[in-house]
Amino acid sequence: MSTENQKPRVAFFDFTSCEGCQLNKLNFENELLDILELVDIVEFREAMDDKADEYDIAFIEGSISTPACIERIHDIRRRSKYIVALGQCAVSGGINAIKNNQPSEWVRETVYGKDKYLFPSIPAMPVSAVVHVDFEVRGCPMSTPEYLHIFKSLILGRKPEVINYAVCVECKQNENECVLDKGMFCLGPITRAGCDAVCPENGQYCIGCRGVISNLNKNGAVEMLKKHGFSVKEAVKKMDMFNTNDLKKVISWGRE
Amino acid sequence: MSKDLKIDVHHVTRVEGHGNIVVDMKNGVLHKAQLDIVEPPRFFEAMLKGRSFLEAAIITSRICGICSLGHQMTSLKATESALGLEISEQTEILRKILVHGSTFQSNVLHSLFLAAPDFLNVGSVFPLVNTHKDVVLGALRLKALANEIGDIISGRAVHPISIVPGGFTKLPSEKELETIREKLINQGLPDALFAADVVTSLAGEVPVFERETEYISVYSDKEYGLYDGDIKSSDAGIFPVASYLDVTNEFIVPHSTSKHTKFNRSSYMAGALARFNNSYDLLSPKAKETAEKFGLKAPSHNPYHITLAQIVEVVHCIEDTIILIDKLLAGGIEAEKPNQEIKKYGRGIAVTEVPRGILFHDYTYNRRGIIEAANCIIPTGQNLANIDDDMKKLVPEIVDESKEAITKKLEMLVRAYDPCISCSVHMLDIEFIE
């Protein structure tokens, strides 16, 4: 990190997002206070007027979705040692990327009508599509424990552990009845854990907000969904909510 | 007076989202006084097309992290109205409690941490940690309590999980509700009243500025309008929710990615002060006492009073939540599944008050429960034209003050309308310790 007697300089930036991740990270007040005694917050528009020239860690919330966003993220990258993408909008484009499935002209016309040309917009992209990203905190909203883990690791100079197993693992650890067995659809088998299976815990199905595991057993997942009476088409539609960009890049389900 | 004045505040701080204040005066003639909104557009209406009725609330929750509960609530009600899904009385009461919780959390943070420092002539909340430590800690406890209500009843305070069309996927236990009730009585209400007392001593610091405008809010004759009701305009009376387009009349201006609105004047106000002005009689007893302490009377035409009205509402929400929990506990919590049997299809329009003001969702569903068209009108957008109009009246009135003083009053004005997020609280708090 920075020179010996200097605390790491940390900055927060928000791009296209709902700012819910920023809210979520504050629900861990005690740990947050401890960590923040070890760092200097040098830039955070919501809280302060100050600006800095260089950062050790820049946390980025939100997707890249306008030409101005691209310019701004390049500028931040040049001045940062580490960039951490905070939340699914920054990690994969998140829910913003749903609009990428439709022609940009149509999308803008639907919302702004004849005034569509006033507001330039490009497909919603993850931060990593434009600049190098060092670490990611997934989820919508982001997982606060994961955020704390990465923050602590960086301050201590350790490499953070990356979770890359399915939500089913955590769901089973919590002794929940399988959501698919209950007759509901579920993306748990292919979605990255780290959320403590919070949606199945609350009677919902996994909506896939943390993105797809990297060692996906595609055929197995398809078989299991079929066994429970769901089609691949339905799965693609459901995945589309938080994984539009992943669907296009990682998986070719939609085109089979 | 022939003054030249140019103010350009790029990305106003201590507000949520990106906005610039632009003032341009030449030879005493005001050419421009406006709030430019430069937040990137999101296109939610387009995203909703083709989505199932079970997904609409999950998607619209992501419009705003702070008002995620309010967006879900409005979305669910629009869906239920379109598809003929009836909800139980228990579901309705639980939803009202959730709306109260999210309202008082947002109001506490905005009024005490973002607006109050301006009244004390300090740049942030840090100095308050020393001079008003009890209030700061009390407000943090209130925030935690509001979060707890969200966590227990909806699974998660930010982007709630268990509220779905037709009901809840998981219900809170009676014991959990009793715990919340105890905390509200023994801790929440005293904390809120104490904060109100401290703010009363500052009421003299609130800027004096009057501009009568049209006040628009949800109205119900049964309760203070928050969860549901008709639309009330202080100029023109009560309108059914179905006529919301006649009330909002959205229009696009080049200086804002957010649409503006107007009804009977060039602009109208939504939010805590509009609610206070339109529904004063329906406030809880202690909330009315709080307003009297502040010397706040309905109608108030001073936009800086939004902050005071927010504290009045905090007291109201806490008192009313206690009553609602008592009602639930009297009958006991009944195990029930969400009612998702589609009875009809077509258009459904719903309205809810979120902390910033009146929120509309309007969906059209096909027979399979898939969205064909969607429209959302959010409160911040509805207040933008009113902020511009306030600035145009305010700048000439204070033009003889220093540029710094004018800039500060304009920033305070914008802040008054924009309940900000809790992040600033903690960051500022920590910065102070260092």
Image (tube, rainbow, N blue to C red):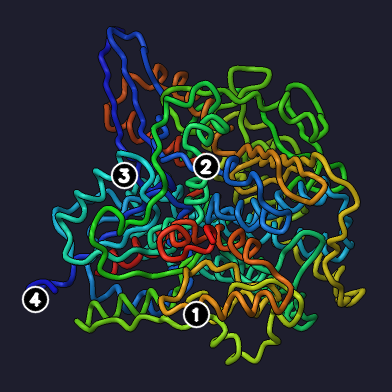
The residue lying toward the viewer, choosing from B326 and A153, is: A153
**Badge 2: few (under 14), some or many (20 or more) residues near its Cα, within 10 Å?**
some
Q: Residue at x 74, y 28 (%)?
A: B233
Nearer to us: label 4 or label 3: 3
Q: Residue furthest front?
A: A256
Give the residue displayed 26% in from the left and 64% down from the top.
A133
- Residue A102 got which mark? 2
Identify residue for label 1.
A217
Give the numbered dot on residue A69.
3
Label 3 Cα neighbours within 10 Å, binned few <14 / some 14-19 / many ≥20: many
User: Could you say which disc has been placed on residue A5 in the image?
Assistant: 4
The number of callouts visible is 4
> Which amino acid type is marked by label 3?
Cys
Instruction: Tell me residue B143's x, y (percent).
Output: 55, 65
Q: Same chain for labels 4 and 3? Say yes or no.
A: yes
The quadrant in which the N terminus of chain B is found is top left
Q: For marks 2 and 1, give the CA distance.
A: 29 Å
Secondary structure of residue under mark 1: loop
